[in-house]
Amino acid sequence: MAQNVYDDPAFFAEYSKLPRQVHGLDGAPEWPAIRALLPDLAGKDVVDLGCGFGWASRWMRAQGAASVLGLDLSENMIDRARASTTDSAIEYRIADLDTLVLPAGAFDLAYSALTFHYVENFGRLVRMVRAALRPGGNLVFTIEHPIYMAATHPNWIVDSDGRMTWPVNGYFREGERTTTWFVEGVRKYHRTLDTTLNTLLDAGFRLQRVVEFVPMAEQIRQMPQLAEELERPMMLLVSASL
């Protein structure tokens, strides 16, 4: 079973304070770039893998999706999503993506935001999602960028010339990594960029777009801390289709 750090009280209390949890999609700098990757949602059946508080699930219904199934391992997340949703066409369930089985041909879009890097067997998940999509279906997801995942130090290092660097080591050493994020021992799974993309191709997906997210100048003006994202990619956005 996957690690369920989001139900840790100390972790969840701090996580809930993040701008993207307080302000929803408007608090996620990458959201405009994600939105550009999404297909027309009118009449579509969607599965939201790692739905969190349900922000994207509700947005997709507002864009005309026929139904949305939101799945998350965390009881805290699902409870918050249910409390914030009155739409009967949105269903939330607790589910472990490491063991999840979806009905074949049930969805037009599978969406996931910053969740797949918690999944140990990415290949299994991708093959299962492909089987759950109808012909012409889409998979759109974001993950922590493999370069960011492979960082060997939690902070920038400033060299003698005053240049900031983000140390990376063991990039090709794939597998489990642990880090400290609000609490110690948060477990994630590092995969190289080519492993991530080739896993999709091997499962029968066609790549539509790959984006190494970088914030826009106006976003940096509003949130100066985003300037460090110009030095190394933090997120990878991927759109694929059948």
Image (tube, rainbow, N blue to C red):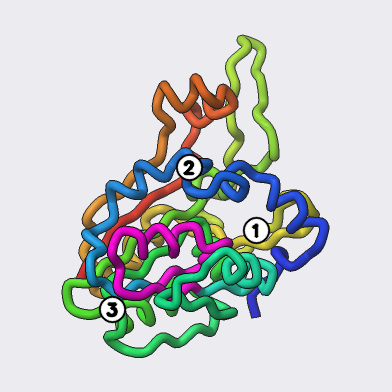
Q: Which mark is residue 133?
A: 3
Is tag 2's residue or tag 3's residue first in the polypeptide sequence?
A: 2
Point 31% across, 89% down: residue:
104
**Residue wearing tag 2:** 26
Q: Nearer the viewer, residue 209 or 92?
A: 92
44 vs 169: above or below: below
Q: Nearer the viewer, residue 82 or 141?
A: 82
Is tag 1's residue or tag 3's residue first in the polypeptide sequence?
A: 3
How many numbered tags mark residues here? 3
What kind of element bears circle 1? strand
Measured Cα–Cα span from mark 2 to mark 1: 30 Å
**Which amino acid lies under the numbered mark 1 shown in the image of this protein?**
Arg
Is tag 2's residue or tag 1's residue first in the polypeptide sequence?
A: 2
Along the horizontal axis of the image, is 217 left or right of 84? left
Q: Does the magenta-highlighted stretch encompass residue 49?
A: yes
Number of other residues with Cα within 10 Å of mark 3, as a class: few under 14, some 14 to 19, many 20 or more: many
What kind of element bears circle 3? strand
Find residue 135 and report its horizontal and vertical position in percent. 18, 78
Q: Nearer the viewer, residue 121 or 170?
A: 121
52 vs 106: above or below: above
**Residue wearing tag 1:** 177
Point 51% across, 66% down: residue:
51
Find residue 109 and report its horizontal and vertical position in percent. 30, 69
Mark toward the viewer: 1 or 3: 3
Query: Which range of residues does the magenta coloring cover?
Result: 47-70
